[in-house]
Image (tube, rainbow, N blue to C red):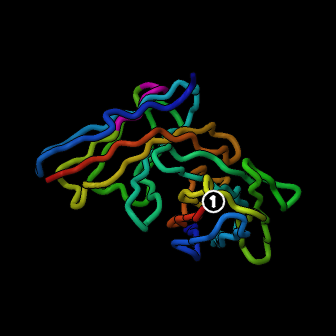
Amino acid sequence: DGGITQSPKYLFRKEGQNVTLSCEQNLNHDAMYWYRQDPGQGLRLIYYSQIVNDFQKGDIAEGYSVSREKKESFPLTVTSAQKNPTAFYLCASSMVQGGSPLHFGNGTRLTVT
Amino acid sequence: AQSVSQHNHHVILSEAASLELGCNYSYGGTVNLFWYVQYPGQHLQLLLKYFSGDPLVKGIKGFEAEFIKSKFSFNLRKPSVQWSDTAEYFCAVTNTNAGKSTFGDGTTLTVKP
């Protein structure tokens, strides 16, 4: 089955540590996205990439970094500079053309203490 | 910058009641419009989309939405809700030039049996 795999489902880290969230897709989509979901705030775009080796900042990129070395993979690193890292993180992918709908993974819940 | 506003944060209905969830967006250019749904314990999935043509679009599970360009609105409707419609609903707009989606804050729908 084609889809998006995010791992792990739950992640716990101590404050001051960087942590990397995995996102893999086998839908052959060119575009990939990272969103952060907080209660009552909907989904906010962190980073997105429309082609390998290129990515753009979203609305809340500070304290995060990404890479896009392969079409299938778009890992997100939450750095120690992110002031409020505890959240639910969603990865998505889509075709690039004409506002194609997003396909979402199941998400990773990160808790930083 | 584009933005999306969902007017109802939490809606509670009895089964068989009619549903209308409001969504307004702000962006002057060409957009594609979406409603996504997140059932409890499941990943976000597409409910329906509008690209062009007939402003009344039909989606899965009896949902429909009407695009009113003059009002910058894309309200979601269902004539008779079921208990299984209990979920969180997100309206999203994609700027066809930038290729990234902006989401509303979401509406939690609770349907009482």
Residue B94 in sight in this render: no
Report crowding for label 1: few under 14, some 14 to 19, many 20 or more residues within 10 A (C-alpha).
Answer: many
Q: Position of residue B55 (x, y in %)?
A: 84, 61
Q: Residue at x 31, y 54 (%)?
A: A87
Where on the picture, by quarter, is residue A60?
bottom left
Seen at 31% across and 34% down, the residue is: A8
Side of B28 relative to A16 (left or right): right
Figure check: A6 above or below B37: above
Circle 1 residue: B93
**In this rendering, would A56 be left or right of A63?**
right
**Residue extending furthest toward the front:** B113
- Left or right placement of residue A58 versus residue B106 in this view: left
Occupied quadrant, residue B87? bottom right
Q: Return the residue nearer the eye: B80 or B91.
A: B80
Magenta region includes residue B56: no
Question: Vertical placement of A3 versus B52: above or below?
Answer: above
| Kind of residue indicated by mark 1 | Val
Question: In the rendering, at what x and y percent does residue B39 appear?
Answer: 53, 50
On-image quarter of the N terminus of chain A: top right
Q: Is residue A9 visible?
A: yes
Q: Is residue A71 magenta?
A: yes
What range is drawn magenta here? Answer: A70-75
Please tell me which residue is depicted at 79% across the width and 71% down the height of the picture.
B68
Question: Which residue is drawn at the image coordinates 72% and 65% (left, top)?
Answer: B16
Q: Quadrant of residue B22?
A: bottom right
Q: Secondary structure at mark 1?
A: strand
Q: Chain of mark 1?
A: B
- Look at the picture and state if B18 lies above or below B103: below
Could you tell me how many numbered marks the image carries?
1
Residue A43 lies, in percent from the top left, at 46, 58
- Given residues B104 and B16, the one toward you in this image is B16
Q: Position of residue B61 (x, y in %)?
A: 73, 49
